[in-house]
Image (tube, rainbow, N blue to C red):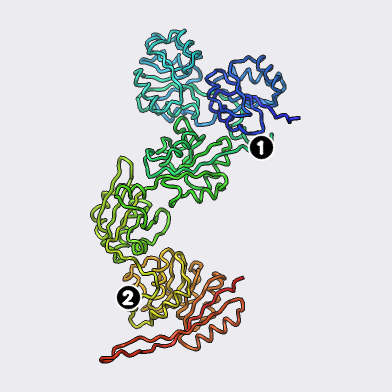
Amino acid sequence: MKERKDSILLFAGTTEGRNLAEALRQTPLLVWVCVATDYGRELEPEGENIHVRAGRMDAEEMARFAREKEISLVLDATHPFAREATGQIRQMAEACGLEYWRVLRGGRTAKPEEAPGEEVRVESVKEAVAYLKHTEGNILITTGGKELKTYQELPDWKNRCYARVLSTPEAVEGAAALGFQGAHLLALQGPFTEELNRALLGQVRAAWMVTKDSGSPGGLEEKLEAARKAGVRTVVIGRPKESGLEMEETLRRLQKRYGFIIPREIVLAGTGPGSHRLWTREVREAVEGADVLIGARRMLEQAGASGNSAGPGAKPCFAEYRAEEIRKYIEDHPEFRRITVLLSGDTGFYSGARNLARVLGKERVRILPGISSVSCLAAKLGEPLEGAGLGSLHGKQENVTALVREYGRVFLLAGAAADIPEVCRRLTEGGLGHTRVTAGCHLTEPEERILEGRAETFCEQYCREMPDGLAVLFLHWQEWESPRVTPGLPDDRFVRGKVPMTKSEVRSVILSRLALRRHTRLWDIGAGTGSVALEAALLGSGGHVWAVEENPEGTALIRENQNRLGVENLTVVEGRAPEALEELPEPDAVFIGGSGGRLEEILETVRRKNPKVRVVLSAITLNTLSACLRYGEAHPELKLETVQIQTARSRKAGACQLMQGMNPVWIVTLEPEQE
C-alpha cells in the first residue's frame, strides 16, 4: 500500500505564496494551494506534489475542503491587507482543530522621514480619501479594485481619479460598474517597474498617488521612487500590524517538522565587462529566473537592481561580494530556492567564482561563463589572444615586466585606472619603456575610453584623461624576441665589482639542481652579486626570490643588477643568516652560496621553516664540503648528492687559444628521502 503523504493547505495569491509553493515543490509534502482567481492559478508553480484550486471560499467551504484533503497544517500567505480573508482562514483552522501559521510579508516598509514633504501616511483607504478631499490635482489609485467605491466620496472623483487594477475580468468589470471607465481605468498586470510607474503618472498628469505599504515584494520602492522623480506626492496606507512567521522561519520549521531539505540551485554568473547587452542567454535566464540576486553593488546596478532592495520585477537583492558573507546570507534565507550570484567578467578568468564555489560547496553550484574585458579589448584592437600572456593586478601581485619579456604581447587586468602609472613605471625601470601600452576603461559602456602610447610617456599624455573604474591593458613590446629557455646568462650581463660571483657554467648546474618551477619561492643565502638569485627570478617569473646578503657592497650590486635586468620578483634582504631568515616566508627551495661558517645553524632554520625544502649548496673549500657531509651523515632522513665541477675557458695567447682552468666547485643537494 502506498504511503500517504502529509498534506498542507497553503492560501496564496501573493509573492510569498508563490515562493512557498515553489520552495515546497519536489518535497515529500502534498501541497494544496488556494488562490482567489484563475489568473492567480496561472502564476503558481507546477509540480507533482502541488495542486492549485482557484475560487473564493468562505470559512465553511474552507473547512470542508480541509477535511476532504486531510490537511495537517494551514499556511496563510495571503496579502497583508486581506484582513477579511485572514480572519476566515484563522476561523476555519480553529474550527477544524488545525495548526495555523500566518506567513508575514518581508521587505522594508515605507517611513515618512525617508521622503519629507512628499509622503503622507494614513491607516486606511477611508483616511486617504478624507485627506485627499482637501487637495487638488489628478490622483493615480494603485490600491486595487476592492475599495474603489470609497474614492467616490471625493468631489469631482470622475475627473480626478484614475484607477489602476489587475487585468482580470472580475477586476475590470467591478471598476467599470462603479463608473471608472475609458482613460480613467488602467487594466495592467505587474510587476511594475519604476519606469512604468513613472510613465503612468505622467500619462494621467497625476499630482497624487495612493498606494498601500505592500513592502518590497509588492513593488513599494519602485512606486515611491517613480513618484519622487515625477514630482508627485504619495499617500501611503500603512501595513496592518500582525504577528506571524517570516518566510525564512516558516521554511525552517517546515523542514524540521517534516524532516526534509528543500533543494536549491545556486548559479555563479559571469556578467561580462559592463553592459548587460553582452550577457549570454544562460546568464540572462539565470537572472530573470532567480528568487534573489547577490553581487557587488555595481553588478546589481548593471542588472537593473540596487542595494538590498527590490530588483527587476520586485526581485530581492543583496549587495555583497565577500564569499563568507554570501554563504551566511544564503544559509540565513532558506526561502530563496533559485539564487544567482553576479560576478564581473568571465567566471573562469581571474574571477572570485572559484573561491566562492569552494566556500558554498562545489556540488551545490552551477557556474556560467561571461565575456571578459580582455576578450572585448582584443576584439576592438584586432589582436588575437593566442600566444599572448595573461595577467591580473586585480587584488593580486603580478610580475608585469617578466610577462612582457616572456610573451612580448600581454593582456593585463588592472584593478583600476590608478594602477596604470605603476605598470608604466615598472616597465620603464625594467628597460621596457618603449612598450606600447593600450588602456581600455568602461569597455562596452557609454563612457568607454581607449588610449594608446609608450610606457615611458603614457602617464604624461593620458593618465589625467583616464576615467575611474576597472581597466584592461594591452602591452606590446615590438622588439620582442623569444626568450632563452636554458639557464646560464653570460657573466658580462652582471655588474660584479669586487664581490665574488658564481660563474655561468656553475650557475647553470646550480639552477638545474634547484629544479625551479614557474611559481617557486626561493631563498638565495649569501647572494653575492645576485647572479643566481636574479637568473632564478627570471626563470621562475611567477614566483619570488629573496636574496640574503650581509655585505652592503653586495646588496648594492644586487639592486643595481636587478634594475639592469628589469627583475620585479626579487627582494633584497640585508642581514646575516640565520637571523635574517626568521621573518621570510616559507621557501620551496634554498640555495646557499655562502654561510659565514654557520652552515648547520642555517640548515636547521631552513628545515624548520619547511621540512620538505630542497637545498642546494656550493662549496669551493674542503672545509665547507666537510661541513655539508657531516650534516648529511647526522641526518639519515635526507638524501645527499654531491657533484664536482671543474671547467676551463679559452683565452687568446698571441695567435693561439689556450685553455685556462677555473677552481673546482662542489655542488651538494639535500632533500628528504622519498617515502
So how many labels did they put on this image?
2
- The residue pinned by badge 1 equals 260
Where 375 falls versus 206 (above or below)? below
Query: Does the image show residue 26?
Result: yes
Amino acid type shown at disc 1: Phe
Quick check: 461 left or right of 188? left
Residue 631 figure quarter: bottom right
Residue found at x 49% / y 89%: 622
Q: Marks 1 and 2, Cα distance to the nearest angstrom? A: 70 Å
Quadrant that contains the C terminus: bottom right
Where 99 falls versus 453 (above or below)? above
Foreground residue among 463 and 264: 264
Residue found at x 63% / y 26%: 75
- The residue pinned by badge 2 equals 493
Return the x and y of residue 131 as percentages of the image width and height: 43, 16
Residue found at x 76% / y 30%: 1
Foreground residue among 221 and 392: 392
Quick check: 352 left or right of 207? right
Foreground residue among 5 and 445: 5
Query: Does the image show residue 596?
Result: no
